[in-house]
Image (tube, rainbow, N blue to C red):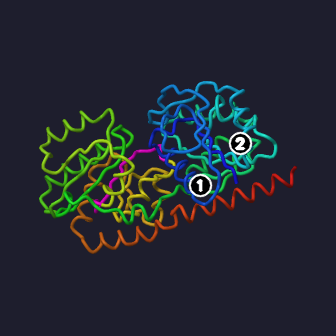
Amino acid sequence: MKIGFVLDDSLDKADGVQQYVLAMGEWLRGQGHDVHYLVSTTQRDDVANIHTLSKNVAVRFNGNRMSMPLPASKRAIKRVLTQEQFDVLHVQMPYSPLLAQRIIAAAPATTVIFGTFHIVPHHWHVGAASRLLALWTRPTLRRFDGVVSVSSAAQAFAKKTFKLESTVLPNVVDFARFSKAVAFPQYQGKLTIVFLGRLVTRKGCQTLLEAVEHLVNRPQKVPEFQVIICGKGPLEVRLKHYVTEHHLQPYISFVGFVSELDKPRYLRSADIAVFPSSGGESFGIVLIEAMAAGAVVLAGDNSGYRSVLAPQPDLLFAPHDAMELADKLTFLLQETAQRLQVAHWSKQYVQQFDINVVGQQLVAAYKQALRLRQNVQ
């Protein structure tokens, strides 16, 4: 099949949707399919068949800094679609009227339009904006031959706001890449807690630092531990000041931005990986990556993370509740057998999200949609 992934953003970033698009796209290419990317401004040259059809402007949405496309040239879109003759256009949802909607509207009747719905709103105004977007894109929503959502939370939001019926096809992890990663030797010898994410309020690194302060000042002893903060963002200076002010330097180190190449090694170095996000998570790719690497995951109880950790709800804690997080960390640090048991369960559980498993399901969904589209024609 010739497949075009449609994204209203750049592929230069390492956000969750970009990870999904590139993971799925390059896996499909490895299976012999001809894969293209129809995106806005992208500079990277390590991925084949990128078609840049719009420029970006920076915006804040759903607690993240992201970009949106300026109006794409209908002539340029038509040229790409005529030249490539895609069997499937796989659109990341929700989508912009200024790029993806123009691609959908210009697609030949023989092309399958398939969608993956990604988001869960973090604030009420995101939900309000999404309802307006649903009205604006309604004419092309009828064109879809199939829609999947990355989680039950995203599925519920797609149904409520966009009136879309979808099945759940989860985000993916390259299980072998994370399970076979080699830990950094400098972090061996102590129990290691890892945070990986942008240093913004929503991701909750502050809650982890407060929990570490509780651990340090508690009368009951815990084994020697260290905390590695992976990521950068606007709160970096404030978080480092908190560490200094509360004399946590012996326990906490900031390593800055972590590349996709190094990410498996940091997660493989973790005994416990903590993700205190307060919301806006449709799924949580980083959770399944950490579990594949062998870490025990503790996560903020938001709808996306809850869908991943539903079989083990004790691994969730109330966002912003540093005391509850400290209690869970104390237990896992002290109870070696329990920690290893949960780590073993996690590694088995996460294999259902392996890209080779989910990818085959996606190919089957494409083929079913193609058969239905051909019958219509």
Residue bearing the label numbered 1:
29
The residue type indicated by label 1 comes to: Arg
Label 2 with label 1: CB-CB less than 8 Å = no
Q: Is residue 92 left or right of residue 292?
A: right
Q: Which residue is depicted at the point 16% across and 51% down?
A: 251
Provide the residue span drawn in magenta.
Answer: 269-281
Q: Is residue 313 above or below residue 195?
A: below
Left or right of 257, for residue 74: right
SS of the residue under disc 2: helix
* Classed neighbour count for the residue bearing mark 2: other residues with Cα under 10 Å, few (<14), some (14–19), many (≥20): some
Q: Name the residue located 66 percent from the left edge and 30 percent from the top edge.
A: 97
Disc sitting over residue 84 in the figure: 2
User: Residue 72: which quarter of the image?
Assistant: top right
The residue located at (61%, 50%) in the rendering is: 156
Question: Observer-nearest residue: 234 or 25?
Answer: 25
Q: Is residue 258 left or right of residue 191?
A: right
Task: Tell me where residue 154 appears, x and y as whole percent.
Answer: 57, 49
Write down the quadrant of residue 163 in the picture: top right
Work out whether 62 lies above or below 262.
above
- Please provide percent x and percent y for residue 169: 60, 57
Rendered position, 208 above or below 340: above
Q: Can residue 328 be seen in this view?
A: no
Residue 106 painted magenta: no
Q: Between residue 169 and residue 186, name the one nearer to us.
A: 186
Q: Distance between the residues labelled 2 and 1?
A: 16 Å
Q: Where is residue 3 in the image (x, y as percent from the top left)?
A: 67, 49
